[in-house]
C-alpha cells in the first residue's frame, strides 16, 4: 500500500496523467526517430511505457516541441509521473534548450518500468541507458531516472538478482555502490559498467552500432 499523498502532489500527479493521455503511440513520431538514432530498436518499445507528445511546452522559451514521454509508475503499477524529453522537430536529438528533460508528477518511489520484472532485473539511471543495457545483458530493465533516485531504488519483491547498469561517472558509480550496499542484504547484486571508457550503456550501444556499419 502506498502512503497518503498530499493535495499538492495529487495535483501534480493528475497533471502527469493528463499529459500521458494526450501523448500518442511512437510509430511515425519524432520520438521514434530519436530512439532509432540512439540505437534503440522497436522491440524495446511499449506504448504502456513510452509515448510521444506532439506539443510539449519548454520551460525555457515556452515554445511547443515534440517530446518523448516515459511513464513513471509506483510499486502497484499506478502512474505517478512522466518524464518529458523535449526533441527537435524531427527527433534528431534533444531540443536545444537549457532544460530539455523534466519530470511532471512524482519521480521518487517510482520507476520507468520498461519490462515486466523477473528473477533478474536491470536498473539504470536513464531510460535510454536502461533499454541499451537490457539489450546488451539480456534481462528486463527499469529506469530510476537520476543518480539520487537510483541510490534509493527498491526492486519489486519478485526480483532475486539485481544488475545495476551504472553510468561510468562519479555520481553514477557512487549511486550504484549505495544501492548495492542496501540491496545485497536480501538480493544477489552486481554492478555492470559499460566499459571501453563509455559514459553509459547507451553511448556504448551507439558506438557499437557505428562500428558494425563501418
Image: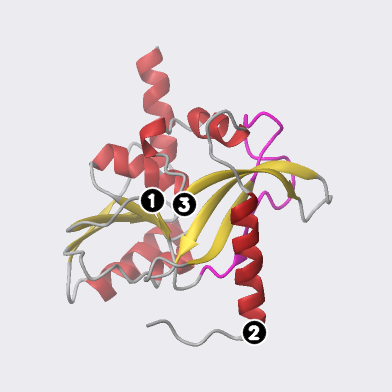
| Badge number at residue 7 | 2
Front-most of residues 9 and 172:
9
Magenta segment, principal secondary structure? loop
Q: Are marks 1 and 2 in contact (CB under 8 Å)?
A: no
Asked whether residue 103 is drawn in magenta, I would say: yes
Tell me, yes or no, if residue 198 can be seen here: no
Where is residue 183, by image quadrant? bottom left
Question: Does 60 sit left or right of 178 as displayed?
Answer: right
SS for dot 1? loop
- Select label 2 or label 3 by which is in front: 2
Question: Can you give x and y, in whole percent of width and height, for residue 37 in the image?
Answer: 52, 28
Asked whether residue 62 is drawn in magenta, I would say: no
Front-most of residues 123 and 105:
105
Q: Which residues are magenta?
A: 86-107
Question: Does 116 sit left or right of 35 as displayed?
Answer: left
Question: Can you give x and y, in whole percent of width and height, for residue 80 in the image?
Answer: 52, 68
x 54%, y 40%: residue:
25
- Residue beneath disc 1: 114
Front-most of residues 115 and 17:
17
Question: Does 191 sit left or right of 129 as displayed?
Answer: left
SS for dot 3? loop
Amino acid at each position: 500500500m502506498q502512503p497518503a499523498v498530499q493535495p499538492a502532489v495529487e495535483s501534480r500527479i493528475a497533471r502527469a496523467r493528463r499529459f500521458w493521455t494526450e501523448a500518442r503511440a511512437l510509430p511515425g513520431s519524432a520520438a521514434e526517430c530519436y530512439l532509432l538514432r540512439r540505437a534503440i530498436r522497436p522491440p524495446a518499445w511499449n506504448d504502456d511505457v513510452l509515448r510521444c507528445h506532439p506539443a510539449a511546452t519548454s520551460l525555457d522559451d515556452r515554445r511547443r516541441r515534440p517530446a518523448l514521454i516515459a511513464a513513471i509508475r509506483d510499486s502497484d503499477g499506478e502512474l505517478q509521473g512522466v518524464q518529458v524529453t523535449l526533441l527537435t522537430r524531427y527527433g534528431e536529438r534533444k531540443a536545444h534548450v537549457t532544460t530539455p528533460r523534466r519530470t511532471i508528477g512524482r519521480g521518487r518511489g517510482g520507476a520507468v518500468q520498461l519490462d515486466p520484472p523477473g528473477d533478474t532485473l536491470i536498473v539504470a539511471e536513464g531510460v535510454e541507458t536502461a533499454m541499451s543495457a537490457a539489450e546488451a545483458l539480456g534481462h528486463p530493465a527499469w529506469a530510476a531516472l537520476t543518480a539520487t533516485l537510483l541510490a534509493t531504488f527498491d526492486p519489486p519483491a519478485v526480483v532475486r538478482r539485481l544488475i545495476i547498469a551504472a553510468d561510468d561517472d562519479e555520481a553514477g558509480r557512487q549511486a550504484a555502490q549505495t544501492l548495492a550496499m542496501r540491496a545485497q542484504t536480501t538480493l544477489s547484486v552486481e554492478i555492470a559498467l559499460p566499459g571501453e571508457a563509455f559514459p553509459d550503456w547507451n553511448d556504448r550501444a551507439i558506438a557499437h552500432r557505428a562500428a558494425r556499419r563501418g
